[in-house]
Image (spheres, grey):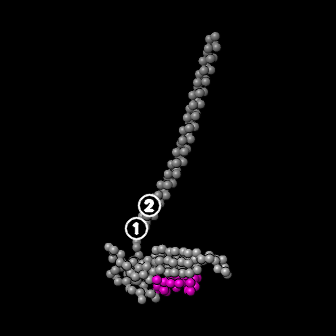
Amino acid sequence: MIFFLQSLWKVLWIRVGLTVLCMLLAVALWLGWELSRSLASLMGERHALETCKNYIGSIDQFRNARIVVYDIAPEKEESISVVRHALGFASIPEDLLEDIKYGKPNAIPSSPLYREDTVIVLRSIDLLQFARFMQHLEQAKELGVCNSFQLNAKTPGDLDDTERWDVQLTLTRLTRSDKRPSVRR
């Protein structure tokens, strides 16, 4: 009988030990699962933090960027020459240049600067021509920087199926007020 009770105690302790071991294993698995979820969440947050840091760096670059200010405004002939060079660079026929509109110099409040806008309207050009035209204007800089542009899709022509676009772009140029901007004729 004592032998029976001793073996019963052994079996009972083994069962209790196995139960505790299973419970510890379940807790360890649960902790591992939670740890992996937390780690994945942490990696996502770290990526978001790096993205935010990049955005802040970009904002700081724009904030600290120098504004190009010109002493004098180019004459109308100079502007047309720059546009014609850009048209040639982009392989755009001159007859697709519909208009160049020159805005009046507008004083910028609380600043010694004037803002001048030049609007260029092109008809029926493809996107590669537009990109090359903008590239040349960006390199030339005489007319200022592109402030905005508008693309309107045209229907494809009969002879080719290239997508064509009507383009209106606004170039903005800043000039100093102590060097009165010339009024274009």
Rounded to the nearest angstrom, the CA distance separating label 1 from label 2 is 12 Å
- Other residues around mark 2 within 10 Å, as few (<14) / some (14–19) / many (≥20): few
Residue 58 in the figure: left or right of residue 153: left
Q: Position of residue 157 (x, y in %)?
A: 64, 80
Q: Position of residue 150 (x, y in %)?
A: 52, 74
Residue furthest to the front = 155
Q: Secondary structure at mark 2?
A: helix
Quarter of the image for the C terminus: give it. Answer: bottom left
| Residue sitting at x 61%, y 14% | 5
The answer to whether one can see residue 70 in this image is no
Q: Nearer the viewer, residue 110 or 101?
A: 101
The residue under label 1 is which amino acid type?
Asn
Q: Nearer the viewer, residue 2 or 89?
A: 89
- Residue stretch rendered in magenta on the structure: 78-101
| Residue sitting at x 62%, y 20% | 11
Whether pointer 1 and pointer 2 mark residues with C-beta atoms closer than 8 Å, the reply is no
Q: Which quadrant would residue 152 be assigned to in this image?
A: bottom right
Q: Position of residue 62 (x, y in %)?
A: 43, 67
| Residue sitting at x 46%, y 61% | 55
* Tag shown at residue 64: 1
Residue position for label 2: 56
**Sequence order check: which comes first, mark 1 or mark 2?**
2
Q: Nearer the viewer, residue 91 or 166?
A: 166
Residue 160 in the figure: left or right of residue 136: right
Q: Which quadrant would residue 19 be assigned to in this image?
A: top right
